[in-house]
Amino acid sequence: MKHLLVSAICMAGLLFAMAGCHMHSHDSGHSYSHGGHSHGSDAQATGEPEPLSYTYWTKQSELFVEFPPLVVGKESRFAVHFSDMQTFKAIEEGYASVVLLDNTSEVIADNVDAPASPGIFRLSLTPTQSGTYDLSFSLNTPTTRDTIIIEGIEVYATLEDAKTANPPQPEGDEISYLKEQAWKADFAIEQVQRKSIHDVIRTSGEIQPVKGEDKVISAKSSGIVFFRNKNLQEGREVRSGEGLFTISSKGLVTANLEEKFRIAKVRVQRTKSDFERAERLLEQQIIGQKEFEKRKADFAVAEAEFETLTNSYSADGQSVSASMTGIVKNLMVSDGQFVEEGTPLIKLTNNRRLLLQAEVSQKYLPVLSTIETANFKTAYHDEVQSIEDYNGRLISYGKLIEQGQNFIPILFELDNVRNLIAGSFVELFLLTKPVTNTLVIPKSASMQDYGSDYVYVQTGGESFERRQVKLGIDDGTEVQVLSGLEEGEWIVTEGAYQIKMASMSSAIPAHGHSH
């Protein structure tokens, strides 16, 4: 299958009526022409000219069309494949048309209101006059309006002229991967572009909680600790105000909270009575102001002590609740354990702010000041992430190396917006000075065999080429290409393994595109 590169022309601002559909300008893209599914042997067997096929990408859709060369008086059937460039799936509804143009004037046209099968629109033209024309393909769906114009399409006077101009071609080395296969699988392509990529220091790091984000809850009285919830354990999430423990001093001789509560209640009743009596005696000038103030103070102290006990005391003992919403980081007591007043019971962390700490070799000290951001990969997330996704920022890097240490610490702070786990280790990519105007591709596009890196380049709608590449900087999400690719080429970024499997098949798959 031979591929002939043809120019893809974008006619900006082209508007004219066409079989009930208005033409419009299309996005810039690339078009490739190559032999169709028939291959050279099929064309020789049928005595037909080599079929034509074109592939064109816009921001909205990919057009892949196959058809026999146009001949005067002979019907040419078009297998028009439209894919959505956002999802790379088949266009399953909408209006499509083909128009033969002569200097932007319609010569003949055909249109259909729906695809014959998902992604494939069946159209046909029967030219009446030979010459060089343009072909316009339009797609109109509820979400997409796209028009692609292919210039320089020849209409031949006779079939023999078409055969002479388009002789059967030998099969090439391209890998065949049908649209129907791509539409059913996870598949994506991306255009090779020049842009910036940051130089990288690769290391490992640890996610840690932020100091001050932890809260320790202690016993407010002595007694025996009873768990309010038997499922209370480290790693469990608790809500602010949720009851965690009850501390009971019932039956204890020296630390009986129930006895203290009864005594405090009696004392507040007695001091209140003395204070109210003092108010009456003061009015009668039986006692002095000093005695009145003393009784008033005794009542205030007794009342405060009683309120303190009342707030934490119940018939079952003193209740201990969570002071914030968070995660149990450390459970410091056992169910049924005796504790003194002030004993730490539990440590909570809210896990909202985290630290990402890493250490690098001293040889990187001259470039540490150029670190702008970082990417990281956890064991429990599939994708490499940026600390910017977590509102992260570089806090500091070590200016002082402790005795006995050979590495320089680096510290980032970030919001825990995607369930990071404190204490987990990560693979870290520290991004330093940018390398500008270089070819960059997604890392997912790169494959490797026996130490060699390669990608799959889409040379046509259903044709792919394995291309060995030399890679440079790797920032965890993107990788620099030093050689093997050209700007503007389309590469497979998702589904490369399926294409690899297709390349290992000795048989050419059945195409099913009857023209």
Image: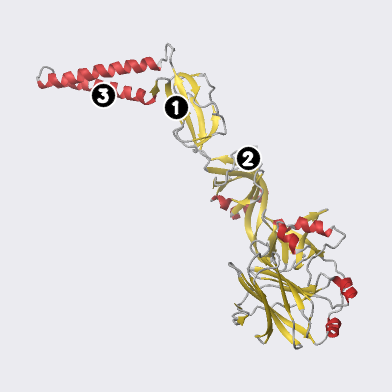
- Up the image or down, 128 lies above or below 255; here it is below
* Labels 2 and 1 touching (C-beta < 8 A): no
- The residue lying at 27 percent from left, 19 percent from top is 268
* Labels 3 and 1 touching (C-beta < 8 A): no
The amino acid at mark 2 is Ser
Q: Residue 408: x and y, percent? A: 63, 44
Q: Which residue is mark 1?
A: 320
Q: Which residue is mark 2?
A: 424
Observer-nearest of 473 and 300 = 300
- Up the image or down, 463 lies above or below 243; here it is below
Among the 4 quarters of the image, the one containing residue 488: bottom right
For residue 174, side relative to residue 272 (left or right): right
Indicate which label's residue lies in the foreground, 2 or 1: 1
Residue 294 visible: no
| On-image quarter of the N terminus | bottom right
Among the 4 quarters of the image, the one containing residue 370: bottom right
- The residue lying at 52 percent from left, 43 percent from top is 353
- The residue lying at 38 percent from left, 16 percent from top is 258
The amino acid at mark 3 is Ala
